[in-house]
């Protein structure tokens, strides 16, 4: 026997021409006969980073629970017991025909299907596992999946030795010829997720609201006050925490885009190309989207294949892709170690934010699986074997983290089969997989 929830999961706050989504509250989840809440939903996030990893400073010493953080993984210390390090998984379909390793491997990153080498419109790879998951689970949420990234990239032409740009710029594929475009502007992603405006509101009215610095929360405040009277203590606390997080993020993304109160001529907006600010904003968007149960599947690209980003804030003057072709030069190794360490720090930030959100009998991270990897291992050799892989969270009890699990010559697709099964998608084959991956549950 179960009782109906106090609130619909699709309840929205309304006011001043704006709609605002709500977090997943206890009052939105049906209870069983004895009053125990229904299990929290499971979420899946992907964190892609380009150009490979300097593996000597990545791979931990020790296996099982007896493993030590390496310099590259040091930022994971607060969440070490929530992380699995998986070694020895291969994505051989990412090998190109001739040159073009980065684009070919990026197209196969979540599909484990070899891409057709072409510079034209006849692109062909495979559906990505996140979209298989979204097709099965997406009807339960407002957005079947969420695709975010830092760099837009070209949509046509050759981006890597004869491989078309969509291969290099996308990891989410709805079908063999249909990449799912990512949103690279934090403000656009924020408003898509949290602020559906009345279609009848004029641009002048919207501009006025922004000019006066009115937030989404200001617009729906009266509706929020009325809702609070219907909530218990736990839900009121969660709602307050959610509003605080939304407002802080709203202020940041408005500043990044130059929106918000008018400050007079000559005041420049914050540099929207700052990868540090954009990445942090995107991580916060993922957390809020999951917390609000707007989606249960999300992918994020820290850069496109063959990223030419210059990490000047790390004291570096060269491009990431150039450093990845290290030619065994110590200076290049040192540069890659700095970049890799910073990338893992962004992943660690996401995990800690998720771990800080209480949800049911645990945290948001406990109910999620958060995957980190790159399209290749060593960027100089373009290795498609023994990829750098982290998998964090407990996926509602299906994962047993806090370990380093060593495999050998096992298809990466086996991991995807297991993840799909964990999320209730009953597949036995995917890509070049041979079956579920053992050892994830302890």
Image (cartoon, rainbow, N blue to C red):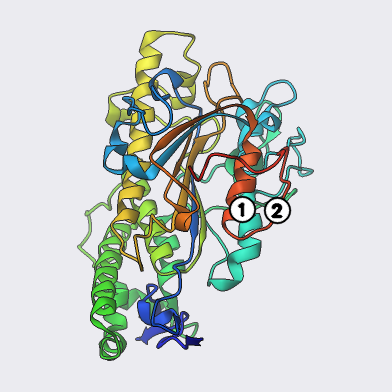
Q: Residue at x 39, y 65 (%)?
A: 291
Direction from residue 353 to residue 137 in the image, left or right: right
Looking at the image, is 138 positioned above or below residue 68? Answer: below
Image disc number at residue 420: 1
The kind of secondary structure element at disc 1 is helix
Residue under circle 2?
427
Q: Residue at x 36, y 76 (%)?
A: 25
Q: Is disc 2 surrounded by few (<14), some (14 to 19) or many (20+) residues within 10 Å?
A: some
35 in relation to 383, above or below: below
- Contact between labelled residues 1 and 2, with CB atoms less than 8 Å apart: yes
Q: Position of residue 133 (x, y in %)?
A: 62, 57
For the question of whether residue 165 can be seen, the reply is no
Where in the figure is residue 288, as x and y percent of width and height? Answer: 37, 63
Residue at the location (44% across, 39% down)? 84
Q: Tell me the quarter of the picture where residue 421 sits.
A: bottom right
Left/right placement of residue 91 relative to residue 253 reads right
């Amino acid at each position: 026997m179960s009782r109906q929830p106090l609130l619909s999961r699709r309840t929205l706050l309304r006011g001043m021409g704006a709609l605002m989504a709500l977090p997943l509250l206890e009052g939105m989840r049906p209870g069983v006969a004895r009053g125990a809440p229904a299990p929290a939903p499971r979420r899946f996030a992907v964190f892609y980073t380009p150009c490979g990893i300097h593996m000597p400073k990545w791979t931990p010493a020790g296996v099982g629970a007896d493993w030590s953080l390496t310099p590259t993984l040091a930022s994971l210390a607060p969440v070490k017991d929530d992380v699995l390090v998986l070694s020895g998984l291969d994505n051989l379909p990412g090998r190109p025909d001739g040159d073009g390793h980065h684009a070919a491997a990026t197209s196969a990153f979540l599909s484990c299907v070899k891409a057709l080498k072409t510079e034209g419109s006849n692109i062909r790879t495979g559906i990505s596992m996140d979209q298989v998951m979204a097709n099965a689970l997406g009807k339960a949420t407002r957005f079947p999946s969420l695709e975010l990234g830092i760099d837009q990239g070209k949509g046509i032409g050759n981006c890597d030795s004869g491989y078309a740009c969509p291969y290099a710029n996308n990891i989410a594929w709805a079908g063999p010829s249909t990449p799912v475009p990512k949103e690279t502007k934090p403000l656009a992603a924020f408003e898509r997720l949290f602020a559906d405006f009345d279609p009848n509101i004029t641009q002048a009215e919207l501009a006025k609201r922004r000019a006066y610095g009115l937030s989404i929360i200001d617009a729906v405040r009266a509706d929020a006050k009325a809702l609070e009277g219907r909530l218990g203590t736990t839900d009121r606390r969660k709602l307050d925490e959610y509003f605080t997080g939304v407002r802080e993020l709203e202020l940041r993304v408005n500043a990044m885009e130059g929106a918000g109160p008018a400050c007079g001529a000559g005041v420049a907006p914050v540099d929207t190309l700052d990868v540090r600010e954009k990445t942090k904003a995107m991580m916060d968007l993922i957390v809020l989207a999951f917390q609000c149960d707007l989606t249960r599947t999300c992918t994020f690209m820290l850069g496109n294949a063959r990223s030419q980003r210059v990490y000047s804030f790390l004291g570096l003057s060269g491009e990431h892709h150039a450093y990845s072709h290290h030619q065994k030069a110590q200076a290049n190794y040192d540069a890659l170690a700095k970049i890799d360490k910073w990338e893992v720090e962004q992943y660690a930030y996401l995990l800690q934010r998720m771990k800080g959100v209480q949800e049911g009998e645990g945290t948001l991270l406990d109910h999620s699986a958060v995957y980190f990897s790159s399209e290749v291992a060593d960027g100089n050799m373009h290795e498609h074997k023994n990829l750098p892989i982290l998998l964090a969270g407990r996926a509602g009890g299906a994962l047993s983290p806090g370990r380093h699990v060593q495999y050998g010559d096992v298809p990466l697709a086996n991991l995807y089969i297991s993840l799909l099964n964990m999320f209730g998608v009953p597949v036995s084959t995917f890509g070049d997989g041979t079956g579920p991956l053992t050892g994830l549950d302890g």
